[in-house]
Amino acid sequence: MVETLRRHDFEGPAWEVFIGMMQEDAQGIVEAWIRNGTMLSKAKEKGRAVTALPPVLYEALRRDELARHDLAQDALTAGGRALRTVLRDGRWDPQQSDLKTTFINLVICQFSTVARTWAASEEYRTREDATELAPDRPDLEAADQLAAAEDWVDLEAQFSGERETVRAMILLRAMGMAPKDVAAKLDLSYRSAEGIWRRFTTKARAQGSDGRLS
């Protein structure tokens, strides 16, 4: 199987199916380990101690299934990227461990970095929720409405590699649609849509933009 994937440079439909199955198979394990603290101890054993989860956020992960799911998805995605690199470089030894074990170990190794990004995003969202009275969307009455729309088009172009859900959110918000209406339009729960948008805006800020209109 690995040699078949190698012929396509670990890209394309075959890779997407393969890594999707790996991630789906590991999802329950990763979420359980996040909930009961096993993930933190395993990361520490590998010299990747998790230092970015204060007690309040860790407690949220224990109680909030959606938050746990989001963090697990981020960790599985990072683990998938790491596995592709390991396989491309020929560093996987089937005599030492099977692919599933290798993948889980890579997820553990990536968890500290992923948790830091997730924690920063959660802390920003908490501050944003406490200080903003209006939804984060274009002011359709503003005199510079055209310039604002152009800003969103530029931002959409910058993140053209994002999945279709994020791109659709950008365009709908640029048209003046409120966040809850965007969620309904895309057939998502409001909390799921909020999590997707929060991760996107965090990435935008990390690349030199604050992720929102001026």
Image: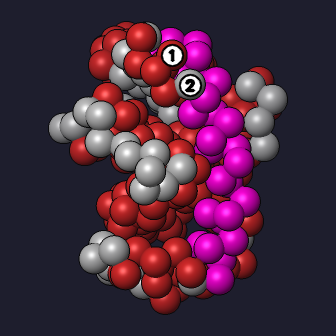
- Name the residue at 58% across, 13% down: 13
In the image, what residue type sits under mark 2? Answer: Met
- Name the residue at 71% across, 78% down: 63
Q: Which residue occupies the foreground of this view, 153 or 141? A: 153
Point out the stretch of residues depicted in magenta.
11-36
Q: Is residue 53 left or right of residue 147?
A: right
Q: Which residue occupies the foreground of this view, 2 or 159? A: 2
Marking on residue 69: none
| Residue 11 position within the rendered picture, expressed as x and y whole percent measured from the top left | 44, 16
- Name the residue at 46% across, 84% down: 41
In the image, what residue type sits under mark 1? Answer: Thr
Query: SS of the residue at dot 1?
Result: helix
Mark 2 Cα shell of 10 Å, populated few (<14), some (14-19), many (≥20): few
Mark 1 vs 2: CB contact within 8 A: yes
Q: Is residue 91 left or right of residue 25?
A: left
Residue that extends furthest to the front in the rendered view of this protein: 95
Identify the image quadrant of residue 189: top right
Marking on residue 4: 1
Q: State which quarter of the image contains the N terminus.
A: top right
Residue that extends furthest to the left in the rendered view of this protein: 208
**Residue 157 visible in the displayed image:** yes
Q: Is residue 155 left or right of residue 34?
A: left
Mark 1 Cα shell of 10 Å, populated few (<14), some (14-19), many (≥20): few
